[in-house]
Amino acid sequence: MVQLNQMLRGQTGRIIKIDSKKKSISRLAAMGFVPGTDVKVVGVAPLGDPIIVEVGTNQVSLRRDDASALAVERD
Amino acid sequence: MTTTQDQVTTSAQRPVHVALLGNPNTGKSTLFNRLTGIHQRVGNYPGVTVEKKLGTVGINGKPVTFIDLPGTYSLAAESADEKVVLDVLNGLVEGIPKPDIAVCVVDATNVKRNLFLASQVAESGIPMVIALNMTDEAKKQGFWVDAAKLSLHTGVPVVNMVASKSQGLRDLKAAIENVSKNKQKMVTVEWPNTVHDATQILKDELNSFATTQVTDLELRRMLFDEDTILTDRFNCSEDIFNTALEKARGHMVGAELHPSSAEAVLQYAHIDTLIDGVIEKVSESKRTITQKVDFFLTNRFLGLIFFLLIMFVVFQSIYTWAGPAMDLIESLTGLVAEPVAGLLEATPTLQSLVVDGIIAGIGSVVVFLPQILILFFFISLLEDSGYMARAAFLMDKLFSWCGLNGRCFVPMLSSYACAIPGIIGTRTIADPKARIATIFVAPLMSCSARLPVYVLLISAFIEPYYGPTVAALTMLAMHLVGLMIALPIAFIVNRIILKTKAQPFVMEMPPYRRPQLRDVIWRMWHRGKSFLKDAGTIIFAMSIIIWAMLYFPHGEHVAQETTKSFITQVASDQNITKEQVIAQLEAEDSELADRLDRRISAAYVEQSIMGRIGKTVQPIFAPAGYDWKITVGILSSFPAREVIIATLGIIYELGDEVDEESDSLKDSLKASTWQHGERKGEPVFTPLTAIGLMVFFALCAQCGATIAVAAREATTKLAIIMFFYMTILAWIGAVAVYQIGSLFV
């Protein structure tokens, strides 16, 4: 199990837990980052942050700090 | 069936109100434009800069009013956009009755996430139609959405559409008619008892403070949202509200349901049942065009190069390409002014009011239009094509440390051409706090109106002494000083004054789409129109006030006394009689008469309200090394900074036709000496004064239009604070340069 912000470009996995104490998780959750959803890191910005994550059929950019709220089981 | 009949007749009397809702990038606004065409009324919701768009059309002879609500991912009431959606759904916005029907626009390529909002809206109890948009793209991506089955599961009509191609409009209208009769409501999520109990706790604690009928939907929003802005629903102290909220949330946490994630988890579980068997794969999904393009455009190197290229074009367009249109407006103003001035020759005060006040005032408003239209042309293209999100993604890291985000880049860049389009362009920043902070610092970017001041001072005081390299470096430094100060100021405002916690920056990367020219032009037009209407009137009023301050009191004796002393002076200089001087003055094409006219103009400025204020406040600017002439120049350029050149021209008796290239103006500046005080006889301008003055111009809020636009786009309070902080900053900068520099020179 890793945090989403630690995954490298191209890696895939499945969200298993949301850290409810983190700020902004309701935003993430509304965008489809809920347990059971498949994710894939598809892009990294030139300065290393933010990252683009494919969640379901969506591509979403989020900062590493926000991504750390999501625990992922890697494929 | 008599009741249904009755309802139909009553509803025929007033329009059926249909709210259009949906996620951003679902083609909702395109649908609204296709439905209402030219029958739109665009304005703002009271107190916020959320655009209010209404349009009334007839469907089968019955009037239907569509309300285009801002695109949101959720009903979470944390931003102004979201609160407007919730307020409209609850019928709390003046002039807009509670909608009879909600049309939820659902992107067919992204049904699951789009239904999240629809499912939240369903809880309002408003009858609903689901507009399944962009079905053509879904097909391209290899799947098909079974509208009939989705309709069966949700309990409301589902209409297949491609709004951009006007497909499905008739079906949608039929579905709206159907729902207005039969009132179908979407199946809502079943909340577990814990949520009901927590809602009840909140209700019990706060009900006695309620300002309106607070619905369960609203109570649940307060429960689920981290930073709810629905506090206006209760007339109680923040403490009472927060205590009640904590108690209700505590109840949920006690039952292992965390308030901030519970909603999404439960809603998505509910949505999974709604879309069970609805989305069918018809062909193997292939890598979409978007994915292929993104491979390059979000790439660390190629993406950056492409980004710089695009931004160069955007910047050039407002910085350079708007030039001819702006020149045209200026010469048109001149063309109008000339005959009018001739007509009013007999009444000089009226002539000056109409020509220098009214016509110049209108010109000073309209002159911004080309830049605004061009910027919004590009912003619309970038937004509608989906590239704006990529640009924000690439740039985010540069801005995140000071509480801004990647979406602030384009408005900031535009502000380098002109802060007016830049500030209006902040509407693309979704995070309201980042938007306010961007408006607050955008005028520090060195706009094109500062350029003439730099050119004049650098070519007069830097280049002759230090050479072209230092001159070029000075020019560069002047363009960077604002940026270097802007980001730390954003940091201070966000983190120290407002104590804003780091805001999440979660942004959808929408698929690339071909922008519809129709929609692009539509947006340009509305943006331009609202600028003329809202900010234009304020800018115009300010021009009139400044004109009056430079014109009045305009006593006749000023001209007489100036003429008298001029004749005496010329007579003694040239050793001729006063009569000979007068004869020279009366000769045709007399150069002497021109000189006299210019001196009278200068005397009038000196005697005007502005001139007197300039002399009075000069001591404030003395630490920066400015005499009263520079002070009046600075004061008169508060409405528009480039005015200083014309004002200096008048004060130095060169007339107002000078520009930054004029050698006569440069020579006058160099020859200007102190007339009183301990430095009497020394030159006013040194390279140090010049650099200080440039820093002053780089930092000062000398633009009435910017202040007016900031007041419209944010709040009047923010505009006032902006004016003072920039002006004080400019003074500190100029004094620091002069005083510290004096220690070394």
Image (cartoon, helix red, strand yellow):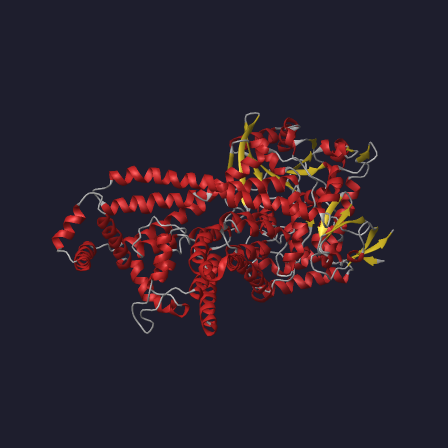
Q: Residue at x 56, y 66 (%)?
A: B497
Whether residue B72 is visible? no
Residue positioned 66% across, 58% down in the render: B226
Mark yes or no: residue B239 visible: yes
Q: How many marks?
A: 0
Q: Position of residue B215 (x, y in %)?
A: 62, 50
Side of B492 relative to A39 (left or right): left
Q: Nearer the viewer, residue B524 or B587?
A: B587
Which residue reaches farthest right? A75
- Measured as percent of width and height from the top left, residue B582 is found at 15, 51
B26 or B251: nearer the eye?
B26
- The residue closer to the viewer here, B109 or B424, is B424
The picture quadrant where one finds residue A50 is bottom right
Give the answer, above or below, for where B456 lies relative to B333: below
Q: Is residue B212 left or right of residue B630?
A: right
Q: Quadrant of residue B635?
A: bottom left
Quadrant location of residue B228?
bottom right
Q: Quadrant of the N terminus of chain B?
A: top right
User: Residue B348: x and y, percent?
Assistant: 23, 46
Q: Quick check: B739 left or right of B205?
A: left
| Residue B734 against residue B97 in the figure, above or below | below
Q: Position of residue B29 (x, y in %)?
A: 60, 38
| Residue B190 relative to residue B600: left or right | right
